[in-house]
Image (cartoon, helix red, strand yellow):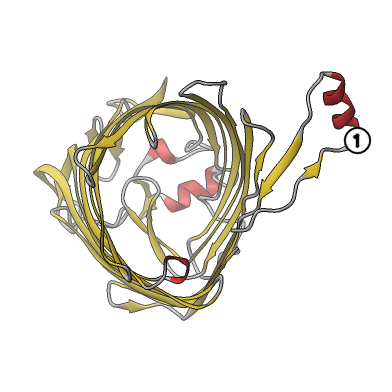
């Protein structure tokens, strides 16, 4: 990262500010990043093709004075390597994805005050290619998302703070239409999830409240706690009644989230630094939506309710000079998810009683090796497995393994 010289605002704005009795010269700290990787994914024994991944970020931090700063950012990330994502209830394999996001955050610091006010706005467009013959940009689960929010931070002891945030956002799936969704959610001519059949039934309007506090437990041990509440309303998705028909009320979900993390940095010598971390998270999604299995004439109340517990220990080693350090990262993530109202089925779809649960784990490693100033070689490896007592997988995928490796270079300025 390099800081640019001061630049003047456009003439009209400068005159207006001068008339207000203030001098607004802005100091810019540009941040640029580019990463190009090639890699391959292996999904349940099926080998994917060697493909490319390209991502970039432009984020010039603009400081107007001691009170006002502006943080615009533009991100684009294309991933041609296959990846398993959870879009409607369990794992779905996608051939490629392309994320694009533009956003801006302002930071206001009142004079001689520990408070920080951070309003923000962003727009995201994600394209997901589910099958090889599907064109990128025409995927069933492509979506737009716009978000506006306000974060309030109280810095009680530099750099530690208490934070509160409130965000409102809308998500729209432009390609999720009746015929396509009906084909995607049917088996042997029968609808498996009629609540997901229709125009834009995955669209949501959401309100998110988050809070966090961070502080030292000892000289080097840092702890952080988070809590959040997410409310989602589906304006086009009606509830499924016990008869299997759609009822007038709309689907509403509430997600409660809690988390805690510990970080322990250590400098073993001038050429070796270590950062250990341990993250713990728990969440529960409560939904009023039901489902109906037409093939077995089975009513499934509260089908989308689930609780999840996630544990993520990790360690990062930094070798050499801080300006050009070789970074080795190792981590493991385990999460357990339970659907208390989703009954078990055998591979033929016969109901057995009991509730569905999933156990997932993922190990990952990464190596960043500097070759020249701002330029590094990058290696990533991941291996994970999802296992479940649910064996009926005509609609959702509950049991699978996934392995991927990536290699390439990154440039940061």
Q: Is 85 drawn above or below residue 197 in the view shown?
A: below
**Res 45 visible:** yes
> Which residue is painted at 23% across and 47% down in the image?
220
Residue at the (68%, 47%) spot, across then down:
28
Is residue 125 or residue 368 the one in the foreground?
Answer: 368
**Around disc 1, counting alpha carbons within 10 Å, would you say few (fewer than 14), some (14 to 19), or many (20 or more)?**
few
Q: Is residue 60 left or right of residue 269?
A: right
- Between 136 and 344, the one nearer to me in the picture: 136
Looking at the rendered structure, the number of numbered marks drawn on it comes to: 1
Instruction: Say if residue 246 shows up in the picture.
Output: no
Residue 89: percent from left, percent from top: 32, 46
Please name whichever residue, 297 or 387, is drawn nearer the observer in this view of the structure.
387
Q: Residue 225, how many percent across, how many down?
A: 27, 34
**Picture quadrant of residue 262:** top left
Q: Tell me where residue 106 sits by quadrant.
A: top right
Q: Quadrant of the C terminus?
A: bottom right
> Which of the 4 image quarters holds residue 35?
bottom right
The extreme front residue here reads: 270
Looking at the image, residue 18 sits to the left or right of residue 90; the answer is: right
**Measured from the top left, where is residue 173 in percent x and y?**
55, 42
Q: Is 310 left, or right, of 255 in this rendering? A: left
Quarter the N terminus occupies: bottom right
Location of residue 95 with respect to 189 vertically, above or below: below
> Is disc 1 placed on a helix, strand or loop?
helix
Which residue, given by chain and number where applicable, does mark 1 sit on? 11
């Amino acid at each position: 990262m390099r800081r640019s010289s001061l630049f003047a605002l456009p003439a009209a704005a400068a005159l207006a500010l001068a008339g207000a009795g203030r001098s607004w010269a802005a100091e810019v700290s540009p941040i640029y990043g580019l990463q190009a990787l090639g890699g391959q994914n292996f999904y349940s024994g099926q080998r994917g093709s060697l493909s490319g991944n390209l991502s970039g970020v432009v984020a010039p931090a603009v400081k107007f004075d001691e009170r006002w700063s502006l943080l615009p950012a533009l991100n684009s990330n294309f991933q041609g390597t296959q990846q398993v994502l959870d879009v409607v209830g369990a794992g779905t394999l996608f051939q490629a994805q392309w994320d694009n996001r533009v956003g801006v955050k302002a930071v206001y610091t009142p004079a001689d005050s520990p408070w920080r006010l951070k309003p923000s706005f962003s727009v995201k467009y994600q394209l997901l290619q589910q099958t090889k013959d599907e064109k990128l940009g025409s995927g069933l689960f492509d979506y737009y998302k716009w978000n506006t929010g306000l974060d309030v931070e109280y810095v009680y002891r530099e750099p530690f703070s208490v934070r509160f945030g409130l965000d409102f956002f809308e998500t729209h799936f432009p390609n999720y239409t009746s015929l396509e969704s009906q084909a995607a959610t049917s088996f042997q001519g029968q609808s498996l999830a009629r609540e997901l059949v229709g125009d834009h039934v995955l669209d949501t309007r959401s309100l998110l409240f988050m809070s966090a506090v961070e502080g030292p437990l000892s000289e080097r041990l840092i702890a952080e706690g988070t809590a959040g509440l997410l409310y989602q309303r589906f304006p086009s998705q009606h509830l499924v009644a016990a008869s299997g028909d759609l009822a007038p009320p709309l689907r509403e979900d509430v997600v409660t989230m809690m988390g805690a993390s510990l970080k322990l940095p250590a400098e073993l010598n001038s050429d070796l630094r270590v950062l250990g971390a341990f993250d713990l998270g728990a969440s529960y999604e409560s939904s009023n939506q039901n489902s109906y299995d037409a093939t077995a004439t089975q009513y499934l109340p509260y089908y989308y309710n689930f609780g999840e517990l996630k544990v993520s220990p990790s360690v990062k080693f930094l070798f050499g000079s801080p300006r050009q350090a070789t970074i080795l990262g190792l981590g493991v993530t385990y999460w357990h998810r339970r659907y208390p109202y989703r009954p078990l089925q055998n591979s033929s779809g016969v109901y057995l009683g009991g509730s569905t649960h999933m156990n997932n784990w993922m190990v990952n490693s990464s190596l960043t090796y500097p070759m020249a100033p701002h330029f590094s070689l990058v290696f990533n490896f991941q291996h994970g497995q999802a296992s479940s007592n649910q064996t009926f997988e005509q609609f959702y995928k509950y049991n699978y393994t996934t392995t991927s490796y990536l290699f390439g270079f990154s440039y940061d300025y």
